[in-house]
Image: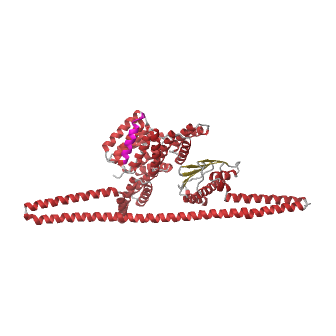
Amino acid sequence: MKRIFYMLLLISAAASAQKKTIDSLNNRLKGKLDDTTRIELSLKLAKVYRDTLPDKGMQLMYQTVALASKTNHKDLLVDAYVQIAEAFEDQAIADSLLKYTKKAIDLATTLKDNQNLGRAHNLNGNSYLQARKFDLAQKEYLTALKFYESIKNPLPKGNLMVNFGYLFQQMGNVEKAHEYYDGALKIFKEINNQKAIAQVYNNLGILYGENNQLKKSEAYFNESTKIREHLNNNNQLAYSYLNLGGINVLLKNYDKGRLYNDKALKLFVLLKNNQGIASCYTNSGQIEQETGNYKKSVEAYNQALLLATKIKDMENMENALVSISNTYEKMGDFKTAYRYDNELIKLKDTIYNKGMSKQIAELETKYKTEKKTQEIALLNKQGTIQKLQIKNRNVTIGVVAAALLITVCFGLLFYNRYRLKQAAILQAEVIKQQDIASKSIIDAEERERKRIAGDLHDGVGQLFSAVKMNLGSLLEHVEIKEPTYSQLAEKTMLMVDESCREVRSIAHQMMPNALLKAGLGSAVKDFINKIDSHKLKITVETTGLGERLDNNTEAVLYRVIQECVNNVIKHAGATRLDIQLTREDNEVSVTIEDNGKGFDSAQRDKFEGIGLKNISTRITYLKGTVDISSAPGKGTLVAIYVPLTIS
């Protein structure tokens, strides 16, 4: 039976995302606090945000890391590293997870912080288990257990037993898995940890489901879901809904399966968990296949395959390829089914090669044994020579045929690899050309801004200055007796003066001196200071921008911030706007948040205009990302992340 159940590996306990808790922590953080208290409260608030506003939680964690590093709070810094790794686990981003667990392990080793060493190694084990590297996962779990044995808190040890149980379950050792789950359940009931109890019930549901005891599996999933709904933990609840959807598919309750699968998908999208989203698409594909909607089934499986490939989720990739092949076979399209079978063979390359080597060894052993038998028979019975030669020939033919078959298989694999390599080279060249085109457009825009700014300042600006001087000199030497003409002359003088200021203002906006001389932070503050604060109150906070960034990076980020602020002024109807610029390690993050009327950010095609496309194009040029989160009546949050190139 193909796996359709999924579990969330236990790590450290996360706080429930209740509005009351968020408001309380935010209010405390607004007060005057020492650095230690501020860092501790920020870490608590980041945990709460992980289940509701993951982007905001991640931003807060990065800020906390910067403050802890600056104030040399190493004990809190290692905890922040582990929290960031946990957040990347929620999003199934293995590379970033391993990056921050390494930072945590290095620092925790010097501090002899056994609890965080256990947490970090446990997270590594989870990542390797997801990639089906069972030996590495087991090694990391055993290392985590060594550190957990030295602390008194039984919860981490219980969590680790759950992970061991799932490891043995993946390896096919059901008895050993059940043993570890029972041990973990005993610990959790003794300390009355409902969240952990729900996790064990979830895993037992998976275990019984994989052994075809479907009703018992559904009962355990229901018990787990009830507890998680009460705890209001979106991250774990999403997996419970996903598993209930999967078990109902096996029970052929397709409407009920769709209901739970849709609930899970909404939560995974909210949490930005690509692994969970891919799993939902896999379940959707199976529901559509079972009900005869083959076209929709293939579409869902392909979405699952795309996401699983992006995050290197081997299990979902394997499930999707098998399912797509089966669906095309049911549709009678055997050519396409065969193509996806070949893709599956590539995915299982290591296992396949191992199996082929074993087969060759077996054939060689049979050949040698048969040959020796022939030699003995030849000595004992000369009359059986012809018979032995025939056997020898048959064995040889068998070996040659097997070798030829293996050679053909390897040839197909190498051809597919070559084809994929050429496609990757072509894609890389396309991306390179797109980057060159984007750079040329942005460079041309900046040059044109400089030219226009120079023309305005040195050309039109100088002409207006000369007009103002000549007009002033004329009015000094000409006596105007009529009051009406005298007033007209004064108004004309004021208009010329206002025109001079307007030309200078436009020239400075197109190429601000502050950006050229003092850098991004100063340029943004200078730009904001020119906006009427009575209509829109704007705050700007900068962190880590003591050193100048690359000229292109500063120019692009300044234009993007300028575009965002102008959008708020034109469309949002906001009274408050908060801008944060943070540089941490080798990346820059910008958040722009207003309290305006907002919009439905899920319907991107209805609000994506030229301004937003310009922002996206510029940030893509810097290899960064732009995330926009908004809802009607709840304001808008724009989060920008840009990696910095190390020279």
578 left or right, relative to 396: right
* Picture layout, residue 266 above or below residue 15: below
Residue 198 is situated, as x and y percent measured from the top left of the image, at: 42, 40
* Picture layout, residue 466 above or below residue 145: below
Residue 353 is situated, as x and y percent measured from the top left of the image, at: 31, 58
Choose between 471 and 214: the one closer to the eye.
Answer: 471
467 left or right, relative to 352: right
Colouring method of the image: secondary structure
Camera sees residue 33:
yes
Choose between 365 and 318: the one closer to the eye.
Answer: 365
Q: Residue furthest right?
A: 481
In the picture, residue 390 is in which quadrant? bottom left
Q: Residue at x 60, y 38 (%)?
A: 27
| Most common secondary structure along the magenta stretch | helix
Q: Residue at x 68, y 56 (%)?
A: 513
Residue stretch in magenta: 136-153
Magenta-colored stretch includes residue 58: no
549 left or right, relative to 532: left
Residue 423 is situated, as x and y percent measured from the top left of the image, at: 43, 65
Camera sees residue 276:
no
Q: Residue at x 53, y 63 (%)?
A: 435
Q: How many marks?
A: 0
Residue 547 is situated, as x and y percent measured from the top left of the image, at: 59, 51
* Picture layout, residue 401 above or below residue 190: below
In the picture, residue 64 is in which quadrant? top right
